[in-house]
Image (cartoon, rainbow, N blue to C red):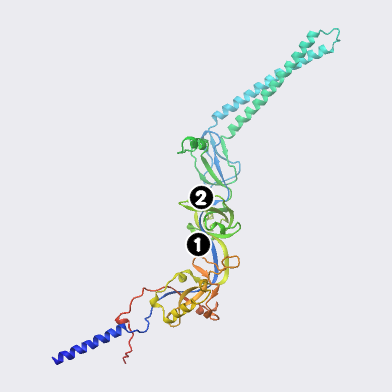
Amino acid sequence: MKKLLIFLVIIAVGLGGIAYWVSRPGEARHVDYTTTPIDFGNLTESINATGILQPHEIAVVTGDMPGKVTDILVKINDKVKKGQPLLKLDNREATIRLKLAKLSQQLAEQELHKATAQRNAAKAASDKLQGLRSDIRPEADAIKAKAELEAAQAQVQQAELKIEEAKQGVEGAQLRMDVTTINAPISGTIIDKHVYLGQPVGVAAPSASSGAEKSATSSTPKPLFIIARDLGQMDVHGQVLEGDIGKVRVGQKGTFRPYAYSNRAEPFPATVAEIHQMPVNLQGAVLYDVVLTAKNEMDPKTREWMLRPGMTATVDMVRREHRHVWKVPAAALDFQLDEHYETAQAKAKLEEWKKRSDRDDWQYVWTVDKNGEPWPIFVKTNAVDKEGDPIGISDGQFKEVVQWDPELKGKLNPKDRDSYPKAIIAAPPWQKPGLFDQPTKFKFS
C-alpha cells in the first residue's frame, strides 16, 4: 500500500511538471515568414485598358450599281494602286443603254441640223422682204416671214436642248458602264475580301430588322473589299473605364502588348491620338474609346508585318513616371499579421504611434528584424500636394514611399541592397505551441 502511494505521488508530480512545461511562457518559435524587399528604382503610374488593333486608314469598297460579278482581279494581301480595277460586273445591259444614248444624241444632232437649215431659210426670206422698199413690200408677207423666222429659231433652240439632254443621257449611260468595273479608291493592301464569281452586288445587306428600321437600312450595300492604306501605321483602340478617362490626355505616351506577342521582352510603344466623346455601355460598364497610334514592325525572318488588324492587346497609358524612388509592395501594405506573432516591443510601438497627431497619414508594414522577429515600420504613401493631387504614385504592384519611419533615418542606402527592409507579405496560420515546440534548457554532452 505504501509503495502504491509513493508511485501515485510520483505520477502526480510528473503530470504537474508536464503541465507547467506546456503552459509556461517560453522563447518564441522560429516562423517561416514570406518576405520581399522594399525596393528602390523607377515607378510608372499607368491607365490600363484592353484594345484591338486596326489600320490607321482603311477604305471599304462596295458596289454602287446592281450587277453580277464576272471577274475578280485581286486577292487578299495584294497591293493595289488608286484607280486599279478590282473586279468586273456583267456589263451587257450597260452596253445597250450606252448605245441607245449615243443613238439619241445622233438623232438630236440631226434635228438640230434640220432646224438650223429651216431657220436659215426663214431668215433669208425675211431679210429679202426687209430689203424691199416699204411702198412695194406686202405687209402680210413681211409679217408671215417674221413669224416663220421666230418659229424656226424656236425649233433650233428646242433641238439644242434635245442635244444637251442626249449628252446627259450618254454621260449617265457611260457612268453606268464605268461602274461595272469597281476600282480601288485608295492605294494600299487588300486586307479583307467578301466577293465571289456570280455574286450579285450593289444590293442591300441582309437585315433582321423590320418596318421603318428595315427600310432605313435597306440601302446599305454589302462590303466587297477592305483596303488598308498603310499597314506600317496602326491604331490601337483602347476601351478605358469611366473612372480613368479623366486621366487620359492627347499626346500621352503608352505601350501595348498584343496577346500574340505576350512573351515579347518589350511592349510596343504608342501615343494617344484621339479620345472619343461618346461612350459605350458593356454589361453595365461605361467605356470610352481611346485611339493610340503606333508604328508597325517587320518580322526579320518572314519580312511580314508583326502587328495585324484585329489583334487584341493590353494597353497601358503612362500618366506619371518617377525615377529613383523607394517603393513598397502593395501586398506588404495589405498584409495583416496575426496578433499572436506580435512581440511586446512591437505592440508597444504601435500603441505609441497612435498618440501622433498625423497617425492617419501613415501606414505600417511588417518587417523581419535581425533576430527574425516581426517589427512594424511606418511609411507615408498617400501624401497630397496643395492642390490635393497625390505626391506618390502606384503601378498596382508597388506604391511609392514619400516619407519613412523616423527610426530608419540614415539606415537606408539605395546602393546597398542589404539595407533594404524585408517586408512580410505572408505568414503561416498561428497555432498554439505543443509539447515538443517548447524550448529546453537541458544540455547533453
The residue closer to the viewer here, 350 or 372, is 350
Locate residue 294, reporting x and y percent: 57, 56
Residue type at numbered disc 1: Arg
Give the label, 2 or 1, closer to the camera: 2
Residue at 60%, 26% (x, y): give it.
99
Residue drawn where x is 52% and y is 80% of the image: 407
First of labels 2, 1 by sequence position = 1
Residue placed most toward the observer, 353 or 227: 353
* Res 139 → quadrant: top right
Tell me, for residue 264, which label it has, or none: 1
- The x and y percentages for residue 98 are 60, 28
- Residue 113 place in picture, x, y as percent: 71, 19
| Side (left or right) of 284 relative to 105 | left
CA distance for labels 2 and 1: 31 Å
Q: Residue furthest left?
A: 1
Residue under pointer 2: 280
